[in-house]
Amino acid sequence: MVLAVVLDCADLARSATFWSGALGYVAEPPSPGRYRRLLPANGDGVELLLQRVPEAKRDKNRMHLDLRVPDLEAELARLLSLGARCLTERPVEEDGWAWHVLADPDGNEFCVLRPPAASTGA
């Protein structure tokens, strides 16, 4: 079984550029259809499938991606430089976790978070 996460977007090229940079993934060449696959650079991991849709995002995501990182502020700056928008004024802190809520260029929310210091999981 292969797990693929599908993400709706308005512009396949823009979303492929953003998410490839954010995740370190490789985008497959564009095709005339409404899908674009992004794969882990090393070939091992979850596939991200971008799906072009005609409607704009209107409500809060029912599901979102969490990107766990060791340096929250450095990763926040990197993601903002790729085109993300930060939706939190300061990091949310809870149970040792700290995170920011961001939106990709299509408005899809995702979080960048730092796990508790004692946690070694990535």
Image (cartoon, rainbow, N blue to C red):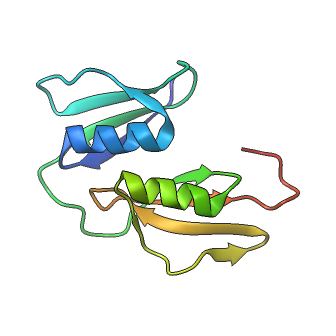
If the image is split into quadrants, where does the C terminus sit?
top right
From this viewpoint, which residue is outermost toward the right?
118
In the picture, residue 84 is in which quadrant? bottom left
Residue 64 visible here: no
Against 5, residue 2 (above or below) is above
Residue 97 visible here: yes
| Image spot of residue 76 (x, y percent) | 53, 61
| Image spot of residue 19 (x, y percent) | 39, 42
| Image spot of residue 81 (x, y percent) | 40, 55
The residue lying at 88 percent from left, 57 percent from top is 118
The residue lying at 78 percent from left, 72 percent from top is 95
| Image spot of residue 32 (x, y percent) | 11, 24
If the image is split into quadrants, where does the N terminus sit?
top right
The mark tally for this picture is 0
Against 115, residue 36 (above or below) is above
Please state which of residues 11 and 84 is positioned toward the viewer in this rendering: 84
Q: Is residue 54 left or right of residue 13?
A: left
Against 53, residue 3 (above or below) is above
In the picture, residue 106 is in which quadrant? bottom left
In the picture, residue 59 is in which quadrant? bottom left
The residue lying at 27 percent from left, 30 percent from top is 36
The residue lying at 63 percent from left, 61 percent from top is 72
Q: Is residue 77 left or right of residue 96?
A: left
